[in-house]
Image: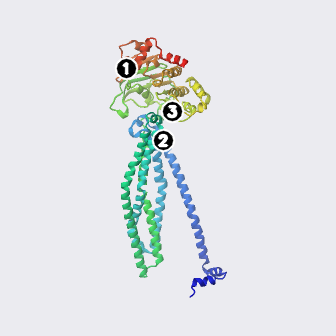
């Protein structure tokens, strides 16, 4: 017996049957054409709208992230210095908030909202179509829909369960690796490479053990969700088969409704699984606006404050009480009084922690006194526009703040729009030009992160050049030479003396050798100025507070100086023979 298939192969259909078939379908050609056009449009519109949606959402999210980060950074920089003293506002946490909060806002608002809208629209459309096609099966699916959604949701959560642990592990390990690299000199000096590596591995093992325990729960959850999912689908198909067997419905209607709503359940489950990200995004929004809406206690650009056009340089601290906001129960000053005439140089000495640098912080208005006034040219600085006032004040700190840029850029920070000639002139005045000219890239030489490519003396001289370029009326020197050797101190002292000429200067120092030429020296003790006078007057008082307040290095230096031993000249002499 020959099969039909063998007969078809032996007697193939003559050519032209397809054309004849099309002719038979001629009455339905308009419908076929409309269907073909619909298919083409469907294939075209879907990708087109997907591209439009993704591009628009990405454009929106990218601009939102940029705008939020810019506004956050502006708000952060607007805060008073005391805000950064609080533990929850340290530099690393603030930087982390700046990096992550904006990204979380973008993820939750710009990206996830579109997914939610798409899935909710799909859900509504699917139910409308399903109830029109077969309302009885749709009712059953609607009854089991929460179970379908929960089952899909449980599956997605179980599969996502390890992402959080991985992210946390990566965050901690990245922090450890970053600290190890940024402090590589300390790590190398103490042979701490193995310790850093062990900490790195430990932070990986902790979430690994946690994930192992969690995997058992996730596996059980996944199995139960599979059971619930397939049981619900089996119930729906059984009921659909029952309707078909009784002639109450057709197979095609049941399958259409089943496929539409079951797939929709997956979309709804995807939406529900986004809840943690939406919650995290909501928290990020709250964090962002808590920074944006905060009113700073010291507004550096208060439009109602009096602008400062010129400063003569007279400074007075009158009956000042002060404690740092982060340590409000530890008083630094109690009824401190200090007056500095315009053009005068005033040094402050005393034991470590007595409050010398706090005087400079108050003059810069990094903080406000808890009582009393800080006045410049007879005006309370709280009534002056701080931004314009700080343009008239130069600050050189013990540890100069250099940015990861070139030497030229670091000096140019002292003045907006500074020309190359002005920068070089300031560098010459600060004894910077000599060593910079010897570098292969000159002023374009990068200083590295926090100036690690330069020595302490070189960094200090660049900081001084920055103040020279600023040309301030008031100069504040906060232990600018305390960490330098004698030779570096000698070179730096020349630059400082050149910078101090004709300016009101406040110096904080541990060593009297750096302040012998100042007009007045004040000894800070117990929150007050307990003794004041010229360098020679204070040194001659062997039993005075000056010897108790200054460090042992000061006393040793003064004793050696009286014996005719000039440490700086000796260092230079030795340097000439080496």
The Cα atoms of the two marked residues, 2 and 3, are separated by 25 Å
Q: Secondary structure at mark 1?
A: helix
Tell me if 111 is positioned left or right of 199 in this view.
Answer: right
Residue 534 visible in the snapshot:
no
Closest to the observer, 87 or 108: 87
Q: Which mark is residue 37?
A: none
Mark 2 / mark 3, whichever is N-terminal: 2
Residue at x-position 39% and y-position 40%: 88
Residue at x-position 48% and y-position 41%: 73
The Cα atoms of the two marked residues, 1 and 2, are separated by 41 Å
Q: Secondary structure at mark 2?
A: helix
Closest to the observer, 429 or 445: 445
Residue at x-position 62% and y-position 82%: 9
Q: Secondary structure at mark 3?
A: loop
Is disc 1 in contact with disc 3, using a CB cutoff of under 8 Å?
A: no
Mark 1 / mark 3, whichever is N-terminal: 3
Closest to the observer, 125 or 400: 400
Q: Which mark is residue 73?
A: 2
Asked if residue 476 is positioned above or below residue 237 in the image, the reply reads above
The residue that label 1 is drawn on is 549
Q: Which mark is residue 452?
A: 3
């Amino acid at each position: 017996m020959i099969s039909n298939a063998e007969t078809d192969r032996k007697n193939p259909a003559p050519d032209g049957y397809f054309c004849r078939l099309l002719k038979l379908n001629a009455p339905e050609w308009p419908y076929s054409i409309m269907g073909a056009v619909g298919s083409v449009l469907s294939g075209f519109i879907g990708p087109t709208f997907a591209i439009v949606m993704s591009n628009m959402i990405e454009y929106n999210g990218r601009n939102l992230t940029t705008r939020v980060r810019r506004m956050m950074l502006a708000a952060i920089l607007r805060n008073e210095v005391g805000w950064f003293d609080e533990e929850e506002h340290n530099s690393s946490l603030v930087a982390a908030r700046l990096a992550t909060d904006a990204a979380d806002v973008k993820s939750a608002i710009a990206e996830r909202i579109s997914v939610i809208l798409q899935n909710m629209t799909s859900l509504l459309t699917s139910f409308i179509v399903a109830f029109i096609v077969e309302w009885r099966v749709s009712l059953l699916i609607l009854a089991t829909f929460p179970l379908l959604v929960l089952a899909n949701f449980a599956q997605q959560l179980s599969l996502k369960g390890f992402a959080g642990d991985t992210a946390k592990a990566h965050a901690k390990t990245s922090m450890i690796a970053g600290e190890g690299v940024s402090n590589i000199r300390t790590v190398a000096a103490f042979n701490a490479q193995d310790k850093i590596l062990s900490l790195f591995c430990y932070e990986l093992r902790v979430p690994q053990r946690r994930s192992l325990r969690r995997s058992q729960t996730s596996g059980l959850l996944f199995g139960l969700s599979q059971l619930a999912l397939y049981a619900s689908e089996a119930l729906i198909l059984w009921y659909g088969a029952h309707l078909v067997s009784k002639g109450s419905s057709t197979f095609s209607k049941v399958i259409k409704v089943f496929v539409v709503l079951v797939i929709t359940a997956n979309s709804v489950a995807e939406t529900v699984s986004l809840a943690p990200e939406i919650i995290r995004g909501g928290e990020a929004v709250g964090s962002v606006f808590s920074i944006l809406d905060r009113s700073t206690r010291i507004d550096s650009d208060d439009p109602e404050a009096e602008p400062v056009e010129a400063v003569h340089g007279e400074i007075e601290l009158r009956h000042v009480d002060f404690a740092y906001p982060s340590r409000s129960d530890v008083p630094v000053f109690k009824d401190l009084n200090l007056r500095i005439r315009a053009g005068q140089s005033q040094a402050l000495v005393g034991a470590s922690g007595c409050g010398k640098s706090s005087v400079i912080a108050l003059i810069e208005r990094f903080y406000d006194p808890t009582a009393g006034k800080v006045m410049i040219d007879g005006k309370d600085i709280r009534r002056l526009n701080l931004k314009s006032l700080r343009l008239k004040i130069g600050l050189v700190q013990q540890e100069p703040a250099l940015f990861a840029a070139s030497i030229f850029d670091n000096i140019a920070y002292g003045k907006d729009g500074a020309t190359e000639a002005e920068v070089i002139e300031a560098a010459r005045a600060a004894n910077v030009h000599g060593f910079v000219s010897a570098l292969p890239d000159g002023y374009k030489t990068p200083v590295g992160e926090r100036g690690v490519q330069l020595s302490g003396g070189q960094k200090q001289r660049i900081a001084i050049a920055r103040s020279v370029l600023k040309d301030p009326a008031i100069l504040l020197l906060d232990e600018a030479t305390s960490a330098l050797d004698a030779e570096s101190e000698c070179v730096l002292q020349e630059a400082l003396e050149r910078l101090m000429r004709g300016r009101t200067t406040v110096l904080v120092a541990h060593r009297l050798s750096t302040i012998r030429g100042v007009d007045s020296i004040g000894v800070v003790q117990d929150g007050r100025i307990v003794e004041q006078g010229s360098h020679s007057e204070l040194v001659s008082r062997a039993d005075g507070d000056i010897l108790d307040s200054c460090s042992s290095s000061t006393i040793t230096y003064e004793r050696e100086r009286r014996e005719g031993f000039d440490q700086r000249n000796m260092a230079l002499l030795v340097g000439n023979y080496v």
